[in-house]
Amino acid sequence: MGRSRRKKSGSKIVNTLLLLGFLAGAGYIYTAPEFERVSPILESSDSITWNRKDPLKLKLSDNIGLKDYELVLSDGLNSLIVGRGNFDTGTKEKTLLVKYPQSKTLDAKSKNFTLKVIVNDSSMWNFLQGNRLQKTLNIKIDYKRPNVNILANSYSITQGGSALVVFQAEDENLDKLYIQVAGKKFKVQPYKKEGYYAALLAWPFNESDFSAKIIATDTAENKRVTVIPLFLKNHNYKISWIRVKDKFIDGKISDLATSNPEYSDIDNKLEKLRAVNESMRLNNENLIHSLSENVSTKMLDTWKVKKFYPLKSGAKVASYGDHRHYYYKTKDNEVSESYHVGYDLASTKMAIIKSSNAGKVVYANDNGIYGNMPMIDHGLGLYTLYGHCSQLLVKEGDDVSVGQAIAKTGTSGLALGDHLHFGILIQGIEVRPIEWFDGKWIKTNIDNIFEEADKIIDAK
């Protein structure tokens, strides 16, 4: 009896140990990274368009590592393997390029295909077979480029100036639509009816060359590039040499530097000047550019502006586009440089500044060298700013009406005398205010363009 009990007791211990071992093994398999159970991921919608000229891009990823793949293209009747292979060990992300096969197995005239994507990862799960992704994509063949027609545009554009274009863009799979000007993409706004668009353009004053192209791309990556026919007028902007005095550095420059922790510890006079006139200026202008890049995506039915006249009886004290060189003591000792990207007006001390056109205030606060500065969005990517104010009469988010008082002139920021720094921007690019001061220029380059386009749109 005692021996029997000992055998049973030993058997229970062995069974218990085996069970514990099994549970430990099962626990390891369920928790160890090499036995993970997450399938690879394909970043793609179920239905895509393809122009067949460019390779399809299939972006794959896996949390542990991709192992192998197979791609099967079918026209509904016949199938063909168009991709098969292994991934390098440890590959977690990979974009596969699928080219349309040269083989005559598939019907070249078919407009609809399917692509079966099979991908295995390097997990030891599923008896070392890994996790599998299997997905079938529906592919619609689209060879046709988007259709673009220019309805009307400004006849010319001046270096540093503005222009308007109204055009039509059609494609059932339209994906991207913008206007390319050098390295800048100008957004377009829907106008009047579906398929029609309007956009203001800007030619940066410090760039001698200019070209504007409407870029329309569909989801199959068919692209249409249409040049906007603008007569170009180059313009020479003023170059100024300004002697920097100690009084200026010890006064305005030091005051602005001490107000900002980034520059407050600079002791050297000329370094302090450069920090304020260049680094601080750049940061302030970056804010202005970011505030003025927005263009509404809502349908625009009409857009009109009157000429801008923000300061009654204001006299010009500095023009737009000046390239300013600052020297210390002697002209051969240049210590800083900057561009003046606005138009300075002065009348009387703390004179009332009015908004010439309706809009929404997007900023009303201090902005470094620009001092107290309200900024207004007038629609279609057109913005105005008012620098060096002594007092702000509006706040961010306010809707302003024509003729409304928005601020008073002053000497805040980098201003020596009481005046208004008036700036106009189109989608983050400063443009010539003098054009927008001129009612005749607005009629010729803006109003007439809309009227010409409207006749075509309304006739359809």
Image: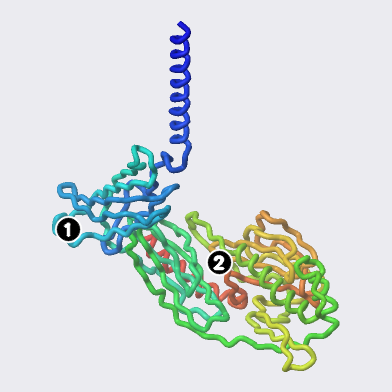
Q: Position of residue 305 (x, y in %)?
A: 57, 66
Task: Identify residue type, mark 1.
Answer: Ala
Task: Identify residue type, mark 2.
Answer: Gln
Tell me if residue 247 comes above or below residue 113 in the rendering: below
The residue carrying pointer 1 sits among few (fewer than 14), some (14 to 19) or many (20 or more) residues within 10 Å by Cα, namely: few
Q: Residue furthest top?
A: 1
Whole-number angstrom distance, CA of label 1 to CA of label 2 = 45 Å
Tell me what residue is drawn at x 85 percent, y 82 percent: 247
Tell me if residue 183 comes above or below residue 393 in the rendering: below
Q: Position of residue 366 (x, y in %)?
A: 75, 64
Residue 256 in view (yes/no): no
**Which numbered circle lies on residue 108?**
1
Judge by depth and name the residue closer to the eye, 425 or 141.
141
Judge by depth and name the residue closer to the eye, 370 or 253.
253
User: Quick check: 64 left or right of 242?
Assistant: left
User: Quick check: 342 left or right of 429?
Assistant: right
**Which numbered circle lies on residue 427?**
2
Tell me what residue is drawn at x 14 percent, y 55 percent: 105
Q: Quadrant of the C terminus?
A: bottom left
Q: Quadrant of the N terminus?
A: top left
Q: Position of residue 90 (x, y in %)?
A: 42, 53
Label 1, secondary structure: give it: loop
Judge by depth and name the residue closer to the eye, 286 or 102.
102
Query: Quarter-wise, where is residue 275 in the image?
Result: bottom right
User: Quick check: 423 left or right of 328?
Assistant: left
